[in-house]
Amino acid sequence: SQQGEEDPQALSIQEGENATMNCSYKTSINNLQWYRQNSGRGLVHLILIRSNEREKHSGRLRVTLDTSKKSSSLLITASRAADTASYFCATALPIIIQGAQKLVFGQGTRLTINP
Amino acid sequence: SQTIHQWPATLVQPVGSPLSLECTVEGTSNPNLYWYRQAAGRGLQLLFYSVGIGQISSEVPQNLSASRPQDRQFILSSKKLLLSDSGFYLCAWNSQAGGWYEQYFGPGTRLTVT
């Protein structure tokens, strides 16, 4: 299986509830990033957490990183219908050349927020 | 502010025909540039990346090639398309400065090979 696997593959919740998505990876990383993709569109960067960080917040988003378990979670609090999208974790390998890095994406979690 | 463009937005091409997808970035200089492919319902696969004009790193052996003729222009090409080349192609960039490694994606090109 490939680096950066999200769990669950699909999640459907009611508006206002919290949504939690998990990501597991296999190798050492420099950082881990979460992206959102609306249907048929490009990806939008949400949050980046470095390998020496354990938790990060941005608005209604909370990301945790456990490098000992090689896992991360994305929590969206007080979900809204506009949060409906696919969410991807991407792990950045330790080698960064002139700022360029290889991101390895998981297959994503399809989140549906029901009004 | 920085903007990334891709064209065309959609493309339907027969097997064996050539391909040229273009990506341009505005509002920044010397960006790192990336080409990804996304199969339906799947994650993204890195195809190529470039840290400067004329420099291309290839990630997977395939029927595609990339070029960077100008600082902010990245082109994905094929001489003869295969059915398996169908997918959603995304261009992305990030800055070499400041230690910020998030990538910014274009709107994508949906390619269907028939």
Image (tube, grey):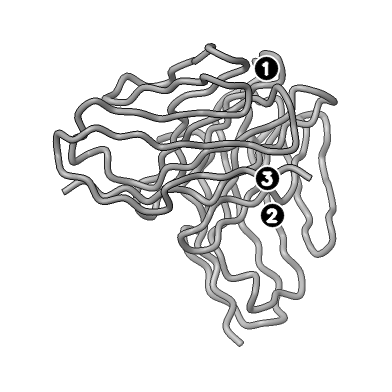
Crowd class of label 1 (few under 14; some 14 to 19; many from 20; radius 10 Å): few
Mark 2 belongs to which subunit? A
Amino acid identity at mark 3: Thr
Quarter of the image where the N terminus of chain A is located? top left
Which residue is at 66% across, 67% downward? A19
Which residue position holds label 2? A74
Name the mark on residue A96: 1
Which residue is at 66% across, 47% downward? A34
Mark 3 belongs to which subunit? B
- Please state if A54 lies on the left or on the right of A93 as rendered: right
| Spatial separation of the CA atoms under disc 1 and disc 3 | 23 Å
| Spatial separation of the CA atoms under disc 1 and disc 2 | 24 Å
Which residue position holds label 3? B3
Of callouts 1 and 2, which one flags the residue occurring earlier in the amino acid sequence? 2
Which residue is at 79% across, 31% downward? B100
Q: Position of residue B109 (x, y in %)?
A: 42, 48
For the residues bearing labels 1 and 2, Cβ distance under 8 angstroms: no
- Looking at this view, is B27 or A101 the one in front? B27
- Please state if B9 lies on the left or on the right of A76 as rendered: left
| Spatial separation of the CA atoms under disc 2 and disc 3 | 27 Å
- Please state if B65 lies on the left or on the right of B108 as rendered: left
